[in-house]
Amino acid sequence: AQTVTQSQPEMSVQEAETVTLSCTYDTSESDYYLFWYKQPPSRQMILVIRQEAYKQQNATENRFSVNFQKAAKSFSLKISDSQLGDAAMYFCAYRSSWMNFGNEKLTFGTGTRLTIIP
Amino acid sequence: GAVVSQHPSWVICKSGTSVKIECRSLDFQATTMFWYRQFPKQSLMLMATSNEGSKATYEQGVEKDKFLINHASLTLSTLTVTSAHPEDSSFYICSARSTSNTEAFFGQGTRLTVV
């Protein structure tokens, strides 16, 4: 079974600075997807960024980028120019690829609470 | 992006009664829906996966007779908590995915309080 580990329960960053959230995972599969989700106080889960394991290029979405190290099974999220609205709980998640039908569920890490200091 | 609507947002019910939570995909056909439970300051725990027209697959430790899941159409799945007890109080979140989507889209969640 796959596992996802987030070793930082809490992180804080000064507004406009950069912060990196860590995530490691364990799997025996070669093809899969990795996600970062944001859960603000409203508790609505919002997809931040997605990475396909077969792609070597790191995904980027505006101020959000990932450092995907497949061999090390590491998937960190970098938030640049942090804004007050980035304050939230961030969850790293793993999902098997399309070819593994019946095993499409998301496995979540325990989350990292990010605080933005004005 | 795709929209998933969950209703109600919050509900209070008496111990021993049943409560139904709806999850609707508004602009796509959800072939697969997932139900999660989230305790305060914890991660999401998958309860069950349902595919349209078939029985739900429950995760180990989840009582299928207590948490009834129905996915009768491609846009609607329901979770019924039967004979609710205070320990069932939690935040329940659904997500939905179509065969054309890589990711699942989440509803806004339902806070259930059993008194």
Image: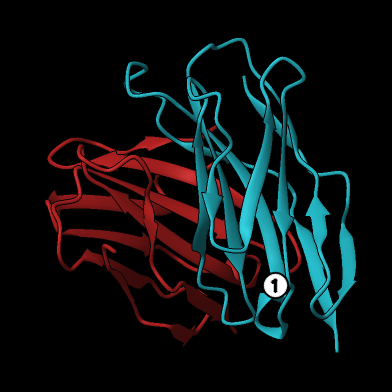
Chain colours: A cyan, B red
Residue B92, x across and y down, in percent: 50, 65
Residue B73, x across and y down, in percent: 10, 53
Query: Viewed as shown, does residue A33 lie left or right of B7?
Result: right
Q: Amino acid at mark 1?
A: Ala
**Quarter occupied by residue B26:** bottom left
Question: Which residue is located at x 37 percent, y 17 percent?
Answer: A100
Residue A11, x across and y down, in percent: 88, 64
**Residue assigned mark 1:** A88
Q: Quadrant of the N terminus of chain B?
A: bottom left
**Quarter occupied by residue A25:** top right
Chain designation of label 1: A
The residue closer to the viewer here, A30 or A84, is A84
Question: Which residue is located at x 55 percent, y 49 percent?
Answer: A60
Query: Viewed as shown, does residue B19 lie left or right of A82?
Result: left
Q: Is residue B85 in sight in this rendering?
A: no
The residue closer to the viewer here, A10 or B18, is A10
Q: Is residue B54 in sight in this rendering?
A: yes
Q: Residues within 10 Å of mark 1 (few under 14, many from 20)?
A: many
Up-down relation of residue A104 to residue A106 (above or below): above
The residue closer to the viewer here, B67 or A66, is A66
Question: Which residue is located at x 27 percent, y 68 percent?
Answer: B3
Question: Which residue is located at x 12 percent, y 40 percent?
Answer: B53
Query: Viewed as shown, does residue A6 lie left or right of A31?
Result: right
Q: Quadrant of the C terminus of chain B?
A: bottom right
Q: Secondary structure at mark 1?
A: strand
Up-down relation of residue A110 to residue A73 (above or below): below
